Image (cartoon, rainbow, N blue to C red):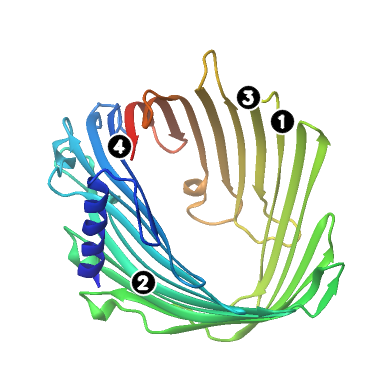
Amino acid sequence: MKKLLLSCLLISMAAGARAQFMRVGPVDFFASAYARAIYSTNADRDFSQDGREEDFWVVTGLRLNAVANVIRNTTISLDSDIWYEKHFIRDDLDRTGDPFGNLKLTTQTALGPYNVGLGANYRRTWRLDNDRFDPEGRRVRTRQTSYGYDGSISWSRNALSWDAFYNKQFTEYDEFERDDTESESFGFNTRWDLIQWGGVPRAAPYYRYRRSRSGFKNEPSRDRDWGDFHEAGVSVLVWQRPRLQYGLALVKDERGRDASGDWRLTHTVSADQTWDITPTVSASVFANWRSSENRVDEDTTSFRFGGSLDHAISRVMRHRAYVNVEPVETLGSDNLTERVTYGYRIERDHLFIQDLRASADLAYDESKFKGDGVGAPAADEDRFTARASLSHSRMIAKDLARTLAYEFYYSEISRRDDDVVDHRFTVGLEYTF
């Protein structure tokens, strides 16, 4: 399967390399080539103050998209991307002869009340490993390949609907083969909109089933056995505006080594509302409450709420403020850590000159341990993150776009003495065939 997907990726990239926008029979092709030069003072955005993270690299790539209606009621789509990275300062990251890539192939077929979907995917990329470091103390980037396939079918008629799915995924690492993983799952969902009022479902019984497993390809002893998940319940829309919904369900979870496999009662309540205060100002709030029995037949309760305020200052400028709260000892919540997140974002189009876009984001996350026992101070943590960016994109020829961008990134955590600072500059070109 992996070789087949890789072959499809190379074939699709060869079509893009011919630099043609074309239609072959029922297939429409869209292709583009791009190049970017990037300089960063902290390429991994890791906590460091000694400049070891500085890097300059060039990215070149090709994209190919294709859409085809090959037979009646069937659509096939292909999305692919392949790119190379050349690093000039961080030699440990340079893999000029080893490209990265994405490939996603999907089909959708409508057969009366049925909809059938099939898909395959391939991705060659990297991850930043938190537990492995190179001789200079930098975190290691582990190259990985993931691929898989999936299928689904759905049916609906009047108030009844159901769907089923299957998914299998593999992940392989270049340097650490013992961590290669595979996962597999399948299941189905059913729903009956039993009571409708004004065309809106008010009460809907449902049932969900999942069967899944995951494991390590090269170490079967670390595999997890198949586990089942069942949920049978009813969802009731109590009020439409503001929206208030209640759910009652019996849940049986046999997945994982700690699963008990007993049926447990679960209650959920959710509410949300949005108000248009003026033509340019809107406000929204939400609240989610959940209570369920745990393994020792005690109730476990969680509660979250928050809100946001959006303001369009003008046609080209807008900003937004929000707050999310996970409290303790509120409406039965038994969280041991109280968490509050504050955020603000502002963005402006056409700043000073045409097509110059600016934005800034601020976020402050406060976590306070409210329980008793050893380890409470270690659970307290404040994190502040700031981003600011400027970007200017313009067509410099009929099919050629140029982008200039700058981004500032800052992050600090109360339990660390150092912080993260990154200045990133990008120059990019993209040609659309």
Q: Secondary structure at mark 4?
A: strand
In this picture, is 45 found above or below 158?
above
Measure the C-alpha gap from mark 3 to mark 1.
12 Å
User: At 48% from the left edge and 30% from the top edge, which residue is drawn?
Assistant: 387
Q: Where residue 44 appears, x then y in whole percent?
A: 30, 38
Pick whichever, 302 or 252, lies toward us: 252
Q: Secondary structure at mark 2?
A: strand
Measure the C-alpha gap from mark 1 to mark 4.
36 Å
Label disc, if present, on residue 311 of the rendered structure: 1
Earlier in the chain: of badge 2 and badge 4, it is 4
**In which quadrant of the rendered view does residue 181 lie?**
bottom left
Label disc, if present, on residue 34 of the rendered structure: 4
Residue with the mark numbered 2: 149
Q: Where residue 253 appears, x then y in whole percent?
A: 54, 81
**In which quadrant of the rendered view does residue 233 lie?**
bottom right
Label disc, if present, on residue 316 of the rendered structure: 3
Measure the C-alpha gap from mark 2 to mark 4.
29 Å
Look at label 3 and name its amino acid.
Val
Look at label 1 and name its amino acid.
His
Q: Where residue 348 appears, x then y in whole percent?
A: 58, 24
Q: Is residue 118 left or right of residue 39?
A: right
In this picture, is 428 found above or below 109?
above
